[in-house]
Image (tube, rainbow, N blue to C red):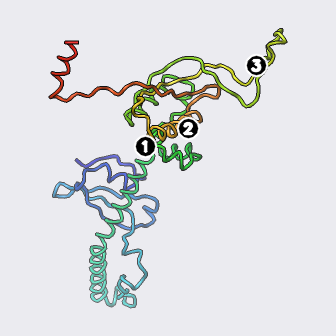
Amino acid sequence: MLPKNIPEDINIELLLSLFPEGSCKVSFTGTHKRNAYNDFMGLEELSDDTLLLNVGRSSLYNSLPELLFHPIDRFENLSPTHDKEKFDSEYEAQEREKEQAHKFFAPFDLMLLRLRMTVRERLETYAETDKIMIDILGDKITDVQKQNRFIKNAIPFLPFCKSIRGNKTYLTIMLRKVLMEEGLTISVCHQKHSFTDALPRYNTQLCSDSNSLYLGNTYYDQAITYIIHYWSEASCNEDFLQFLDELETFRKFIQDYYIAVDGILRFDISRDEEPLRLSDETAYNYMNYNMNI
């Protein structure tokens, strides 16, 4: 069905993306005063159930240097009144050459149009996935952080860092999603931890005892703690040490982008044993052994 009320200033690449592939043909009608700033010149319904889209753009043929492919004006010195027959004959010959030239360059024009459509689709995909905001917010992410496997999974959440910051529920959901990609599970643990400052701390409360003014370098504070279930004593090897380094880099990244200024994030690695995996052949004997015990 021929669509109606199409905006005259619509972009052709956008309009073509709304039609099923192969349902629309394109004709480049060229630019002139009437459509100097518009692409869309109209739609026509063809006999083969397709639509002809007239595009107000010049063909590649029209952009080439004069006399290279353009025909020479044969009737420049002919009078349309005294030499009417010859004038009409030369005019028709020139129009046929123009028509043939447009047909020759039509595949190139369509190729360029499809290329513009592909670029437009990729730009829309780039914008829809918030990659522009990710690049802006993550402008200061170092190369070391970009190579971190956990940070790679957390970068897509950068556009939502304002909502996540200060919200433990959102933070927990994000961390579970990020660590789940690496086959890890976490659990939340609310408890106080001891911290050490480079500078000593002092008691600033009024009417405090003189003996309690100096608090020392160590203090206790509430921290958002997540227990990561990863390893057992038997699996503590060089891979585990590398995992700890990656996890600490990830913790600092989360602390900078997703934790409130007064918040503290900690990761505790649990020593839970790996779950026992049973094959079909040994499942029956194993269960029988347990029941005998």
Foreground: 190 or 120?
Answer: 190
Instruction: Determine the residue positioned at 53% across, 17% down.
Output: 190
- Mark 1 is surrounded, within 10 Å at the Cα level, by few (under 14), some (14 to 19) or many (20 or more) other residues, namely few
Residue 246 in sight: yes
Distance from disc 3 to disc 2, alpha carbons, whole Å, reads: 30 Å
Distance from disc 2 to disc 1, alpha carbons, whole Å, reads: 24 Å
- Residue 33: give x, y in percent of width and height: 45, 65
**Position of residue 238 in the picture relative to residue 278 (left or right):** right
Please state which amino acid type lies under the numbered disc 1. Answer: Glu
**Position of residue 47 in the picture relative to residue 218 (left or right):** left
**Position of residue 293 in the picture relative to residue 221 (left or right):** left
Instruction: Determine the residue positioned at 73% across, 31% down.
Output: 198
Q: Does residue 75 lie above or below 31 as drawn? A: below
Camera-side mark, 3 or 2: 3
Report the disc number at residue 2.
none
- Residue 72: give x, y in percent of width and height: 37, 87
Identify the residue position indicated by label 3 in the image: 215
Please state which amino acid type lies under the numbered disc 3. Answer: Leu
Instruction: Determine the residue positioned at 29% across, 55% down.
Output: 43
Residue 154 in sight: no
Q: Does residue 265 lie above or below 127 as drawn? A: above
Decide which of tag 2 and tag 1 comes sooner along the chain. Answer: 1
Identify the residue position indicated by label 2 in the image: 253
